[in-house]
Image (cartoon, rainbow, N blue to C red):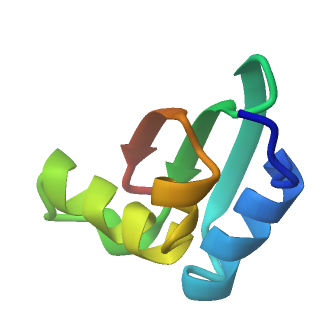
């Protein structure tokens, strides 16, 4: 699946919703398999599932349309 989405674009999407987060994004295979680490104080007290849901919400339709795989790591600051 060829996409126009880049690691920088995914990073910007997350930062638009979580502006004070630390977000690192890279490709790990092909052009649609990404790895992402998000560190954000707002994750404090939230389960890992809830943390991931926040990031997926920030990515929106890209998770269904442009991202084939996302290795996601989240943690509170």
The quarter holding residue 28 reads top right
Number of numbered callouts drawn? 0
Q: Residue furthest top?
A: 29
Would you place residue 23 above or below residue 41 in this image? above
Q: Quadrant of the N terminus?
A: top right
Q: Residue at x 49, y 74 (%)?
A: 60
Would you place residue 2 above or below residue 66 in this image? above
The quarter holding residue 62 reads bottom right
Residue 43 percent location from the top left of the image: 31, 65
Q: Residue at x 59, y 45 (%)?
A: 67
Residue 35 percent location from the top left of the image: 61, 30
Residue 49 percent location from the top left of the image: 16, 51
Q: Residue at x 43, y 63 (%)?
A: 55
32 left or right of 31? left
63 left or right of 15? left
Q: Residue at x 78, y 18 (%)?
A: 30
Asked whether 48 or 58 is in front, the reply is 58
């Amino acid at each position: 699946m060829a996409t126009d989405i880049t690691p920088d674009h995914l990073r910007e999407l997350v930062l638009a919703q979580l502006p004070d987060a630390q977000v690192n994004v890279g490709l790990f295979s092909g052009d649609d398999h990404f790895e992402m680490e998000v560190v954000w104080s707002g994750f404090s007290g939230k389960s890992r599932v809830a943390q991931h849901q926040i990031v997926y919400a920030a990515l929106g339709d890209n998770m269904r349309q442009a991202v084939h795989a996302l290795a996601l790591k989240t943690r509170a600051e």
